[in-house]
Image (cartoon, helix red, strand yellow):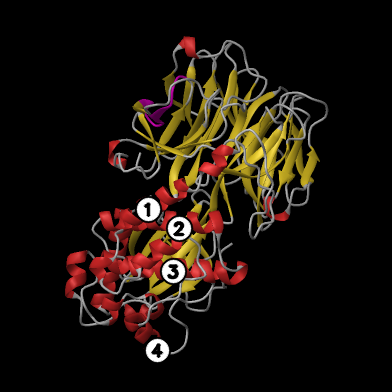
């Protein structure tokens, strides 16, 4: 979690309607505050130092940061929400990334290696590729400017970024952090994307070794080594070592670009996977460095599909990302996956899958094409599956038809906590909510009871009866409200912290079962059998529109567990009922059909994968696949 210090006298208490609750960090340009709003959630608020208000150059640089960040939003960077001026002091409001900087992470956890290190390298190289494609040079890439967010690494701080053209003219002053500056920055020469690649390599070396590549003594000594000494990379394993060596060339023209680095990393990761494919029909145990987890190899497939074709990642013949959406496929054709979730552990993007064939919850590293751990489900018929932060640790939480919810913290071993939430057996739906002081699970039982459970303590927080069974439940996305779809075709908004008070309700469809619900961005999506997906406003539950699904593609019977073949996020509704389709949730208009994605999904989920909005899909007799939705 991010470290927050208390506000001091004279510091602002509110900006643009956000209440400031602490300070995330201070820099030479400004301070970054943690802001909060009951409806809009938490944000990072950067405010220019009061002493710099009269410095026109500082003000221009600050305002330019907002424009720069907006150009690369969604590419492993923090999304800009708004910018403005308060009492003559410019401010910038951006997405809050709840995680330590890479610098803090390494200090607290030690050097990174294996899949975690390769994921960090790949994700940050992808971010730099997008930054450079937008004609921007970061100029201050370093461990403190990489946040280890719960959904993957994020590159931040564009306060000194420049276009290549303007960067070549700004030679009167040296900008950057000495230990991570390229030789040409120190010499006052032109700063180009190649300078960022030198800084990136120095940063990745720090992540791999825990020490600064060029020492941490006096600034003149550090700069002398950068200009003249050959760095020692002997402690870094291949394939990363060779890539870093190329990026640390003293001559900028000899360094590869970010796109070349990304291609090299994905290609070399792919070259290490044949051993995984060879053990497809048997399982081997090995230790995962730093976690002491059991690794279960189960027929992993690591391919990249672009458009309608399938090629090995990094293949020279692979088309560019502009030719079609990028897909990472992984898994075993022989396993039936009933539920799936997308999240992260130790800042590495992961997928959790309920494997009905083996009766286990599998934890996948899709980039490595490997199951890194696995535990028994504990019961059949998984109703819900999600990643959640329980206390200070990341966990995987699921509900099952035996009426229990289970909590597994992979970083703590293979122990699974069982919470007996419902009496007897039957349909169980669950939604995980980061409510108030502790993450809670809202559980609906077959007998019409609905409960809130504190996942950290395992204690019941509230209980109420709804008078009829609940088919599915979903968190509103902000606050503590949840939405439930009922057996009699009702959509209800409930405040579990207000004695379960029903705020509003609306008829979904007379005589048609509502089998699933999703909520996000002020909207509610309800899966109605025989109709499709209906979209409602969260405020007042007014129906906006309907995504109609062909009747032949819709099941005739209500499923035993919540329908999981659709997902809602900000700006996109994704359905997997008859192929994979992206819709505009505010108009119900079709945005596009994803190629090479025919058939019906048994489960799909939306989240961040390597810092990019993505959807993970499970279908019968196929591998699981992650589709990149960034920019849609």
Counting residues from the start of the chain, the first of labels 3 and 4 encountered is 3
Query: Which numbered mark, 4 or 1, is in the foreground of this view?
Result: 1
Q: Is residue 135 above or below residue 202?
A: above
**Residue at the spot of label 4:** 221
Q: Is the Cβ of the residue at disc 1 closer than 8 Å to that at disc 3?
A: no
Q: Position of residue 528 (x, y in %)?
A: 54, 19
Please tell me how crowded label 4 is: few (under 14), some (14-19), or many (20+) other residues with Cα within 10 Å. Answer: few
Counting residues from the start of the chain, the first of labels 2 and 1 encountered is 2
**Residue at the spot of label 3:** 203
Please tell me how crowded label 3 is: few (under 14), some (14-19), or many (20+) other residues with Cα within 10 Å. Answer: many
Q: Is residue 327 above or below residue 515?
A: below
Q: Position of residue 232 (x, y in %)?
A: 45, 75
Judging from the image, what secondary structure is the residue with disc 1 in?
helix
Residue in front for this viewpoint, 513 or 252? 252
Q: CA distance from mark 3 to mark 4?
A: 18 Å
Left or right, residue 413 beside residue 311? right
Is residue 97 among what the camera can see?
no
Q: Position of residue 323 (x, y in %)?
A: 28, 36
Left or right, residue 270 beside residue 64? right
Please tell me how crowded label 1 is: few (under 14), some (14-19), or many (20+) other residues with Cα within 10 Å. Answer: many
Q: Residue at x 50, y 32 (%)?
A: 567
Counting residues from the start of the chain, the first of labels 1 and 3 encountered is 3
Judging from the image, what secondary structure is the residue with disc 3 in?
helix
Q: Residue at x 76, y 37 (%)?
A: 463
Q: Position of residue 273 (x, y in %)?
A: 51, 44
Judging from the image, what secondary structure is the residue with disc 2 in?
loop
Q: Residue at x 58, y 20 (%)?
A: 514
Magenta span covers which residues? 578-589
């Amino acid at each position: 979690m991010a470290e927050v210090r208390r506000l001091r006298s004279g510091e602002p208490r509110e900006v643009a309607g956000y209440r400031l609750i602490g300070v995330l960090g201070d820099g030479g340009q400004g301070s970054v505050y943690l802001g909060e709003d009951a409806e809009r959630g938490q944000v990072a608020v950067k405010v220019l130092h009061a002493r710099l208000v009269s410095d026109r150059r500082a003000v221009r640089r600050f305002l330019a940061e907002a424009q720069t960040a907006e150009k690369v939003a969604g590419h492993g960077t923090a999304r800009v929400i708004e910018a403005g001026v308060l009492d003559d002091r410019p401010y910038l409001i951006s997405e809050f990334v709840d995680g330590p900087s890479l610098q803090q992470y390494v200090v607290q956890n030690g050097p990174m290696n294996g899949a975690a290190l390769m994921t960090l390298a790949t994700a940050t190289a992808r971010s730099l590729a997008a930054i450079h494609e937008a004609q921007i040079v970061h100029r201050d890439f370093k461990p403190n400017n990489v946040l280890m967010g719960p959904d993957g690494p994020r590159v931040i701080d564009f306060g000194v970024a420049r276009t290549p053209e303007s960067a070549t003219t700004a030679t009167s002053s040296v900008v950057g952090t000495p230990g991570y500056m390229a030789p040409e920055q120190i010499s006052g020469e032109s700063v180009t994307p190649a300078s960022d690649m030198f800084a990136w390599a120095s940063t990745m070396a720090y992540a791999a070794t825990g020490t600064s590549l060029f020492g941490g003594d006096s600034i003149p000594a550090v700069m002398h080594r950068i200009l003249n000494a050959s760095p020692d990379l002997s402690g870094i394993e291949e394939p990363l070592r060779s890539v870093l060596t190329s990026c640390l060339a003293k001559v900028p023209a000899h360094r590869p670009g970010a796109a070349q680095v990304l291609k090299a990393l994905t290609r070399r990761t792919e070259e290490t996977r044949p051993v995984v494919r060879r053990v497809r029909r048997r399982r081997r145990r090995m230790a995962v460095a730093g976690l002491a987890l059991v690794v279960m190899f189960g027929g992993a497939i690591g391919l990249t599909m672009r458009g309608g074709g399938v090629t090995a990642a990094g293949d020279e013949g692979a088309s560019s990302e502009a030719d079609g959406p990028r897909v990472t496929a992984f898994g075993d054709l022989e396993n039936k996956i009933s539920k799936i979730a997308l999240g992260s552990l130790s800042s590495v993007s992961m997928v959790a899958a309920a494997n009905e064939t083996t009766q286990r919850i599998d934890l996948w590293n899709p980039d490595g094409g490997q199951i890194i751990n696995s535990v028994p489900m504990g019961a059949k018929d998984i109703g819900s599956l999600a990643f959640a932060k329980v206390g200070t640790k990341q966990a995987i939480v699921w509900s099952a038809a035996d009426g229990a919810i289970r909590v597994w913290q992979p970083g703590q071993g293979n122990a699974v906590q069982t919470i007996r939430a419902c009496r007897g057996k039957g349909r169980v739906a669950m939604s995980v909510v980061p409510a108030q002081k502790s993450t809670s699970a809202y559980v609906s039982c077959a007998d019409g009871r609905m409960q809130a459970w504190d996942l950290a303590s395992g204690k019941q927080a509230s209980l109420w009866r709804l008078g009829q069974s609940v088919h599915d439940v979903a968190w509103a996305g902000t606050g503590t409200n949840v939405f439930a779809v009922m057996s009699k075709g009702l959509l209800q908004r409930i405040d579990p912290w207000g004695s379960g008070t029903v705020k509003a309700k609306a008829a979904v469809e007379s005589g048609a079962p509502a089998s699933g619900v999703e909520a996000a961005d002020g909207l509610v999506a309800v899966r109605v059998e025989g109709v499709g997906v209906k979209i409602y406003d969260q405020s007042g539950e007014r129906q906006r529109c309907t995504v109609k699904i062909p009747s032949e593609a819709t099941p005739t019977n209500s499923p035993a567990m919540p329908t999981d073949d659709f997902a809602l996020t900000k700006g996109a509704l994704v359905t997997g009922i008859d192929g994979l389709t992206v819709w505009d949730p505010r108009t119900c208009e079709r945005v596009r059909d994803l190629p090479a994605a025919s058939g019906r999904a048994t489960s799909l989920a939306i989240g961040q994968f390597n810092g990019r909005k993505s959807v993970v899909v499970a279908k019968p007799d196929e591998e699981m696949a992650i589709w990149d939705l960034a920019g849609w």
